[in-house]
Image: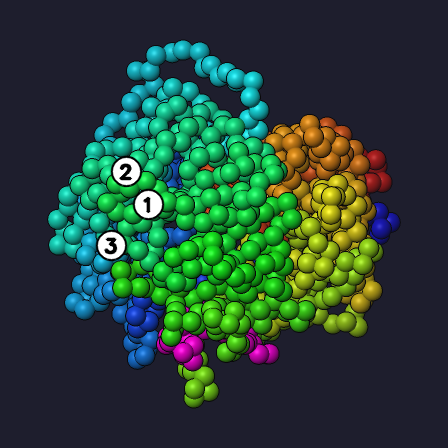
Amino acid sequence: MRNWLFYCVIGWWSITAIAAEQSAGYQSPSAELMNIVDAPLIPKSKLSADGRWLALLKRERVVPLNELKLPEKALAGVKFNPLTFMRKSSRVYSEIELKHVETGSIVSLKGLPNGKLRDVSWSSNSQYISFIVEQKHSATLWLYDIKTRQTKQMTTTSLNGVVTKNAYKWLPDSSGFVVNFAVNHGKPLMSEKSQKLAPIVQQSSGVKAPIRTYQNLLKNAQDEAEFKFFAQGQLAKLRLNGQAKVIGKPTYLKSFSVSPDSTNLIVGMIDTPFSYQLPYQRFASVWQVWGMTGFPLYQLALQPLADNIPQGFDSVRVGARDFQWRKDKGATVLWAEAQDGGDMKNAAEYHDHLYTISAPFKREPELFAKVKDRFSGIQWVDDNIAMLTEWQFANRMVRTSVISPRNADDRRVVFSERSYNDAYKHPGRFVTEKNDLGVDVLKLVGGRYLFLRGDGASKEGNKPFLDRFDVKTNSTTRLWQSEAPYYERVRALLDDEGMRFITLRESKLEQPNFFIRDLTFDSLTQLTRFPHPYPKFKGVTKEQLKYQRSDGVELTGNLYLPLNYDPSEGPIPVLMWAYPLEYKNKIVASQVRESPYAFPYIGYWGPMPYLAKGIAVFDDPKMPIIGEGTQQPNDSFRTQLIASAKAAVDILVDQGIADPDRIAIAGHSYGAFMVANLLAHSDLFVAGIARSGAYNRSLTPFGFQGEERDFWQAQNQYNDMSPFFHVDKINEPMLMIHGKKDPNSGTFPMQSERMYAAMKGLGKEARLVMLPYEGHSYRARESILHVLWEQEKWIEKYLLPLPKVDEINNIDSTLLNDMVDAGETGTDVL
């Protein structure tokens, strides 16, 4: 009788809870989880060129839902606010503070209007810091003067950041800016009624044109007209005194960059025809060099619509591409041209050639260098030293060489050659500084020494370092390395010897803060004192588990245990959160890529908040998908995925931590794809949480993630990997969450809708939550709280123990009596 009553009560709770959930709107999780959403974030930082001022940019974790309801346009692959002519961005700030590095004094920028601060940038002379203030109907440029402590509005006309990623750029000599004004700001948009109604026609030419799936593309003539309206910008030179002088005529700007000597511009302009299959980056484009009056000095390229780039991640346009200034010269343009038809699969001694042309742009271009693989970039020092990087996707190799720009093909010395997945061989990132022209170049000391700061990945975990590289001997000396029990990273160099630098330091128990480390005096000075962001989780620590897959691949994962964990009480529920990655090398796939001494970040995004529910969290257990030699990783995707998941489950069970019947699997994006596959092809997990995922790969027929082959070349792999085709095998409940406006390539909201429909149609247990106004990631406070609530309820339902029998006694006695009477008479009161 008691057991019957127990399950009747549980059933009643479940039914009434479901009814309430479907009609109650946005929900909030328990208080512990809510507090995480409101916890302060460590500010972003930007150091002035002279190293004297550290700008601390305060961020907000979330925005109100009403902000997502603001007007929005989505055209040619870009989303933007039509009132402000600005792209949607997560890099916005609520406040800027300037901290003096030596004295520790703090200056807060005052006199700013209400609005979002974005695109923060120091002048090269370190006297000014600039930023855009985005308000409801405008986005204007502002300036703060360090000497006068004054804030000044530089423009009243709104800037245009719809297509150009930067709406303004400093002149390298710090005398002013080049800005892109929104010439159509405030003008009425052409109405749909004024557009002539006509069929929408597209036609292919019979030439192969493999294109990945994109969203928010142009669809008709009205979209084309709107894109022209919003993309049109007017460049202008803006002096610090506020005087502006237009540069050329209004045009559909794609890109602009200022020459190091502040006298010329590289300008990219979008040209017709537009495409309904491609984003604006692949539209036809005109590239020119302009003087500061807008007069075209040299035509770099007429790029046609790039609708036939060969298949492959390292395939490129035919013809000139990747236009950039030589940073060590006043006005010299460099660009690349493929020598293989844009297809790395075609045999070629050199896949790319690099060319240059210099002011006054009246001579023919010169061949600068021949590149064996695909050109990736150049980091400049001077006429004697530069670092040239090239790469190839097929073998995942990246090579960086020391070259002499005087003769780049002569005496080239390889500095680093490795798989770009190989963290252990990563040499670090070069330290830069402003040169005499005011642009960033590699910091060179004594004509031979460069500096590198890196993560220092190793079998023991990340040990960040600072190295000095001797160009003449091609040798490296370690100046400093982080030591246990701290995880400390170099953020900026403060001298020419590599003896004083700013670090960000943390430990398992100490939150990150900025410090000044002086190797000469072996001293450490604390620069900031940010409070502990999650006091309720103080004491949570991380243990890095190492274990092995059945095929010998070594794996790692981060185990977090709840604060009240008592091993004597036996195994507990576990939430596992993961993301698969592709590799071409088994040894590289086994590498450790994080520090065991990092501060536990209890963000709302992943699994960490649910430690508050008394469960364990196994975060980022590695799920490598490896294809060595001629094999591609996805040739055995399912086999490797299941093997990795089983190894993770086994280590948790073997150590007595996990109850094997109460382990859930969760992931976002490709991690959601992983979740659905594991539920379909294994019985390792009791439930799954899949967010913003893709489940049917036939809807992304020209590649996805690291898969280069199209559907027709690898139909078996596409079918085998698509959990949509295996819904009938799913025996565990799956919670799916997706933003209704997800713009991410491949993860159309329809993916989750169709997956849910399939699961429901086949009688599987599933729940689908579509978040209004949200994209691939979720930004609104209301949305995030609701996601936390959904996940919390799912975890409570499938991972946590059922209420104990004695808890039944607390239920209203009248309800119990009614249920007992109904049971005895056979009446269904539920």
Q: Is residue 252 left or right of residue 587?
A: left
* Residue 536 seen anywhere in this rendered image of the structure: no
Relative to 379, residue 231 above or below: above
The percent position of residue 244, horizontal first and vertical second, equals 15, 46
Q: Residues within 10 Å of mark 2 (few under 14, many from 20)?
A: some
Report the magenta residues as a range.
481-505
* Residue 449 seen anywhere in this rendered image of the structure: yes
Residue 245, located in which quarter of the rendered image? Answer: top left
Q: Amino acid at mark 2?
A: Tyr
Residue that numbered label 1 is attached to = 357
The percent position of residue 246, horizontal first and vertical second, equals 17, 40
Q: Amino acid at mark 1?
A: Ile
Q: Secondary structure at mark 1?
A: strand
Which of the two marks, 1 or 3, is nearer to us in this view?
Answer: 1
Q: Residues within 10 Å of mark 1 (few under 14, many from 20)?
A: many
The percent position of residue 468, horizontal first and vertical second, equals 48, 73
Which of the two marks, 2 or 3, is nearer to us in this view?
Answer: 2
Q: Alpha-carbon distance for marks 1 and 3?
A: 15 Å
Looking at the picture, tell me which residue is in the foreground, 804 or 810: 804
Q: Amino acid at mark 3?
A: Asp
- Residue drawn at 84 percent across, 47 percent down: 4
Residue that numbered label 3 is attached to = 261
- Residue drawn at 27 percent across, 64 percent down: 436
Indicate which disc residue 298 carries.
2
Q: Main secondary structure of the magenta part?
A: strand
